[in-house]
Amino acid sequence: MNIKTVNITFHVSDFKEAVSFYENILGLRKTSYWSTYAIFDLCGIMLGLEPGGERGSKKGMPDILLQVDNVDDEYRELKNKGVKFLTEPADQSWGGRTVKFLDPDGNVFTLVEIKKRT
C-alpha cells in the first residue's frame, strides 16, 4: 500500500481548550484551522482535533487516517488479503472518498482518497 500522509484525529471535549493546549502549551505548529477541526504538525504527522470526545474517557479511540491514491484499489487488494472492513468505499460530503477497516486487534483505520477538484 502506498500511503501518502498520516492523520491521527483526537475527539476532544472542549475544542478551544484543546487547540490552545496543543498550540500554546506543547508548542505544536497549527497548519490548518476551521471552526470544528484543527490540524497540527507532529513531526511530519498530521494531528487533528475535533469536538465530540468525553473528558477522561478511555473509550474514545483516535481516528487514524491513511491517505492513498485510490481507495477502491486499496480496498480490493486488502479485502483479497482477508482484511475486515467496517464500511464500503464511499464518497464524502467534503469531497473525499473513504473506507474503514480493522487491524487484528480491532483498531480502526480509515483509508482516505483526496479527490482532485475539477
Image (cartoon, rainbow, N blue to C red):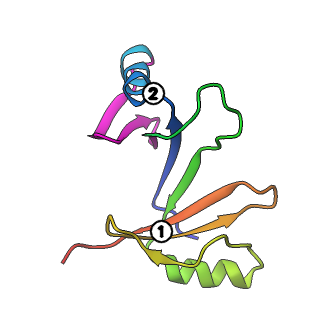
Image position of 104 (left or right of 114): right
Residue 27 lies in the magenta stretch = yes
Mark-to-mark CA distance, 2 and 1:
31 Å
- Rendered-image quadrant of the N terminus: bottom right
Residue 37 in picture, x, y percent from top left: 36, 42
Q: Position of residue 5 (x, y in %)?
A: 46, 55
Identity of the residue furthest to the left in this view = 118
Q: Which mark is residue 18?
A: none
Q: Is residue 38 left or right of residue 14?
A: left
Q: Can you tell which mark lies on residue 68? A: 1
Three-letter code, disc 2: Asp
Query: Earlier along the polypeptide chain: callout 2 or callout 1?
Result: 2
Q: Which segment is the magenta one?
A: 26-49
Secondary structure of the residue carrying numbered label 1:
loop
Judging depth in this view, the residue of 13 and 107 nearest the camera is: 13
Label 2 SS = loop
Residues 78 and 1: in front is 78
Q: Nearer the viewer, residue 107 or 45?
A: 107
Q: Amino acid at mark 1?
A: Val
The residue identified by callout 2 is: 14
Q: Residue 4's quadrant in the figure?
A: bottom left
- Tag 2: Cα neighbours inside 10 Å, few (<14), some, or many (≥20)? some
> Left or right: where does residue 55 sit relative to residue 32?
right
